[in-house]
Amino acid sequence: MPPSSAQNLVKTAADNSVREIAVFCDFDGTFIVKDVGSTLAQKYVADLRPAQMGRVLKGEISAWEYNMQVIDGMRVPEDELEEFLNSLELDPGAEDLLAWCHKNAVPFRMLSDGFDYNIQRLKELFGVEFDCDCNGMHYEEGLWRISPGYPNPDCGCGTGVCKRGRINEFRAAHPGVVTVHIGNGRVSDLCGVLAADIGFAKDTLALELGNRGVSFYSFETLKDVVTELERIHIS
Ligand SMILES: [Mg+2]
Ligand SMILES: [Zn+2]
């Protein structure tokens, strides 16, 4: 993706008609329709999930500790993973969003609490390209072994990729750029959407923001997001 800089503006800053923006986007359940990790966990470690999820909800363990209890060591045969990844679908507006950012020289970055192995394979399968911050996963004797990508002890999110941390780091390097975060998850997207200047939310993230009285753009597909970004960008 091209760097964010003044010469990338579609119109000159002098007429104040274009805002320089940067887009951050969640992957599972937002860029693709399903959630890879939780769908596989429902199939392969269904017995472990409810108790550990209960502990997360009670605040006894963090989201990443949940991953270590449930996902780390999960035995997913590689051919079954490949078959599952082949069955997934992009959000109907996913490619439109990438194209819109590219056309307008708007920096785009995927922020995912999912795993690099799966995202890399899905990029190949769908023929799409984007920068991505996520967690690590590799196979060890048939078992998933995972490692956190960007944990942040200063944030309450407890995830492997603190999206607030990623957005704040970008902001420090690019002061004045309007940051946008798009997501669907109450746990993995909340700190990111609160850190961003503009939030797009659906599913549990939208419910959580509603409960907190935080304003956001709601969306059903990324096509809705592109329509709104066009308005935000040229205003
Ligand atoms: Mg998600
Ligand atoms: Zn965080």
Image (tube, helix red, strand yellow):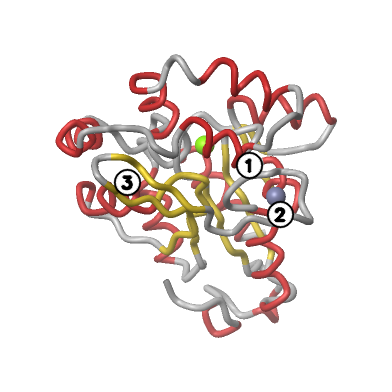
Q: Which mark is residue 118?
A: 3
Splitting the image into 4 quarters, where does residue 23 fall? bottom right
Q: Nearer the viewer, mark 1 or mark 2?
A: 1
The residue lying at 76 percent from left, 29 percent from top is 59
Tell me if mark 2 has few (under 14), some (14-19) or many (20+) residues whose alpha carbon lies within 10 angstroms of its own.
many
Q: Earlier in the sequence, mark 3 or mark 2?
A: 3
x, y percent for residue 101: 45, 61
Question: Which quadrant does the C terminus fall into?
Answer: bottom right
From this viewpoint, which residue is outermost toward the bottom? 7
x, y percent for residue 229: 57, 51
Nearer to me, 6 or 206: 206
x, y percent for residue 153: 74, 55
Q: How far is mark 1 from mark 3, CA to CA?
A: 19 Å
SS at mark 3 in the image: helix
Question: Which quadrant does the N terminus fall into?
Answer: bottom left
The residue lying at 52 percent from left, 73 percent from top is 10
The residue that label 2 is drawn on is: 196
Q: Nearer the viewer, mark 1 or mark 3?
A: 3
The residue lying at 40 percent from left, 66 percent from top is 103
Q: Is mark 1 within 8 Å of ligand 1?
A: yes
Q: How far is mark 3 from mark 2, CA to CA?
A: 26 Å
The residue that label 1 is drawn on is: 189
Splitting the image into 4 quarters, where does residue 199 fall? top right
The residue lying at 21 percent from left, 34 percent from top is 77
Tell me if mark 1 has few (under 14), some (14-19) or many (20+) residues whose alpha carbon lies within 10 angstroms of its own.
many
Which kind of residue does numbered mark 2 sit on? Answer: Ala
Q: Is residue 50 left or right of residue 223?
A: right
